[in-house]
Amino acid sequence: MWTGPLFLSICVISVFSWFAVAQWAEARRREREAYYRSEVLKKLAESSGAGGEVSLEIMREQHRIENTRRREGLRIGGLITFAVGIGLVVFLHGLIPNEPVYMCGLIPLLVGIALGASSFLVSRE
């Protein structure tokens, strides 16, 4: 009997279900962390004058860290996409040498350049 396709479909459904539950759990964890962080900052802001300054400084530092991570993510994504574009140009040119099919590799190459350039335009507060 053909149990291969049945087994494969059950495995695929199981893997995607596991990914969905893992993503849901991660979203809930981040939501709880944000809630507790906002509660702590609110308590600090409501306390004496020094607490308000501390909470503002904490918020500024979190914003700075978030911007730095965003910039680094754009640079890494741009570098990876740029490398994929170069690899695709080389691969397609070697695969079909007399046709300009390799020009399709310019699409990810240019997207990588745009991502890398945009990382320098993101605010540096």
Image (cartoon, grey):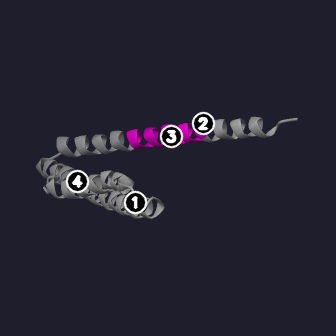
Horizontal and vertical percent position of residue 80: 36, 60
Disc 1 is placed on an element classified as: loop
Viewed as shown, does residue 125 lie left or right of 24? left
Specify which label sits upstream in the sequence, 2 or 1: 2
- The answer to whether residue 47 is above or below residue 87 is above
Numbered mark located on residue 98 in the image? 1
Specify which label sits upstream in the sequence, 1 or 4: 1
Image point (28%, 41%), residue name: 38
Q: Amino acid at mark 2?
A: Ser
Horizontal and vertical percent position of residue 46: 18, 40
Pointer 4 residue: 114
Q: Is residue 55 magenta?
A: no
Viewed as shown, does residue 103 lie left or right of 42? right
Q: CA distance from mark 4 to mark 3?
A: 34 Å
Pointer 3 residue: 25
Disc 2 is placed on an element classified as: helix
Pointer 2 residue: 17
Q: Amino acid at mark 1?
A: Asn
Viewed as shown, does residue 108 lie left or right of 4? left
Image point (33%, 56%), residue name: 77
Instruction: Please tell me which residue lies in front, 91 or 29.
Output: 91
